[in-house]
Amino acid sequence: MELSLPVYPLAPSTWGAGEEVTVVDVVQSPLFAEFGGTRHTSYVPVVLEPNAVEENWRVRRLGAGVLGEIAQFDRARYVDLERIHQSQLLPMTLAAVKFDAEHGKFAVDVILPPPQLAVPRNNAGPDCLVLPSGDMAIIDTERGEFSAEQLASLAPGQWFVGLQTAGDTDVVVTLGERVLGCVSAADLDDVRAMLLDAPSPDNGCIVARAFFLDGMAALDIADYSDAADPMWLHVPDLTHSGPDGGKQFETVQFPDGSWAVTVDRSRAAVPTRPRTNSQGAEPAPLVDMDVVEDEGASILAEPATAEPPSSDDGDYLTEVQKARRRRSQDVGRHRKP
């Protein structure tokens, strides 16, 4: 099954640890068909599709059907992921599938980084090779060109940084056109080995994810071969710098002097909108269930037939008068004695 939009690979975790976001309304049948004989946790790639009606996420397995949904509350926590949707891309991450023996069904959790670290604040570049996430490698920022104030402005956040070997003694970390620092001596050998094992892209640009948090800057990096699929190694550019980058409203004036105002649905919708599901909703009667007081009024009129005039002056009765006369004579004739 092909996706409607390209995917945007996320780092499922930060330095090996991620948040497990519960998936509700899990579709059980495909999970039993594939994982029915296993009791360990399986990890599958998924994409998060925005549901404009319920304002939640549909969790779709990559290349397959929907697994379930992520509640509106959890989606609202990850505001930066709206940048990905606005860029016409689908966030891709991992989901943990495990059998819940107590309830006799499968449970699914989507793995995401903390909200403030979920989406990179810059682009890697369309031709760059992005190494997978995995282990922490400290960046020695004292050897870089950034001041303490500039480093503080980068946190908390995730950034794509370039990696270049400098002889046999250093791995230089760059952010934009400036040197951020060098990989610490304790992690130097491991990072150098990862760079040597990675294939060189056409432009020679190898990128990794760096996290800035609590006064510390460190790579989140793993070997090239740890990527389950090559699509994880290439991250497209985001065209929106923030979730609220668009205009709040637009106005158009027509030649006749009238105006049209267009407002984004998320800004125009009432927070307490009507329920869209049938659970707990009151039934709406479609007919009047009250007792009819005038029984004669509830009996349908029979087709009118021509009758001779009954008045002395020779005037004929109208059809309405004829129907009323027959109705008054026939009241109750269908009742049982």
Image (cartoon, grey):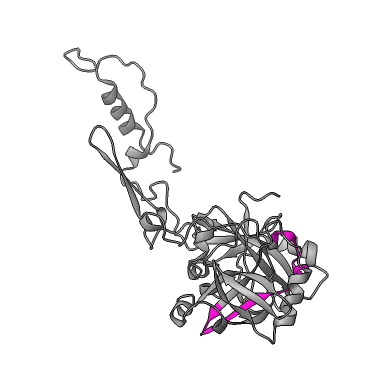
Residue 291: percent from the left, percent from the top? 36, 50
Q: Tell which residue pokes out farthest to the top in this image.
A: 314
Q: Which residue lies furthest to the bottom in this view?
A: 186
Query: In the image shown, does 66 or 102 lie closer to the viewer?
Result: 66
The residue lying toward the viewer, choosing from 328 and 236, is 236
* Observer able to see residue 41: no
Q: Quadrant of the C terminus?
A: top left
Q: Which quadrant of the structure image shows residue 244?
A: bottom left
User: In which quadrant of the rendered view does residue 324 lie?
Assistant: top left
213 vs 38, nearest the viewer:
213
The answer to whether any part of residue 157 appears in the image is yes
Q: Does the magenta stretch include residue 277?
A: no
Spot the residue most to the front: 167
Q: In this view, does 159 lie above or below 125?
A: below
Numbered label tally: 0
Q: Where is residue 68 in the image (x, y as percent from the top left)?
A: 63, 62
Residue, far left: 313
Q: Is residue 271 above or below residue 170?
A: above
Residue 19 falls in which quadrant of the image?
Answer: bottom right
Q: In this view, does 236 lie above or below 16?
A: above
Q: Where is residue 265 in the image (x, y as percent from the top left)?
A: 41, 53
- Judge left or right: residue 326 versus residue 50: left
Residue at position x 40%, y 36% in the image: 333
Q: Which of 14 and 64 is in front in this view?
A: 14
What residue is shown at x 74% (from left), y 60% (from top)? 230
Q: What stretch is highlighted in magenta?
A: 212-232
Residue 72 as seen in the image, left or right of residue 203 = left
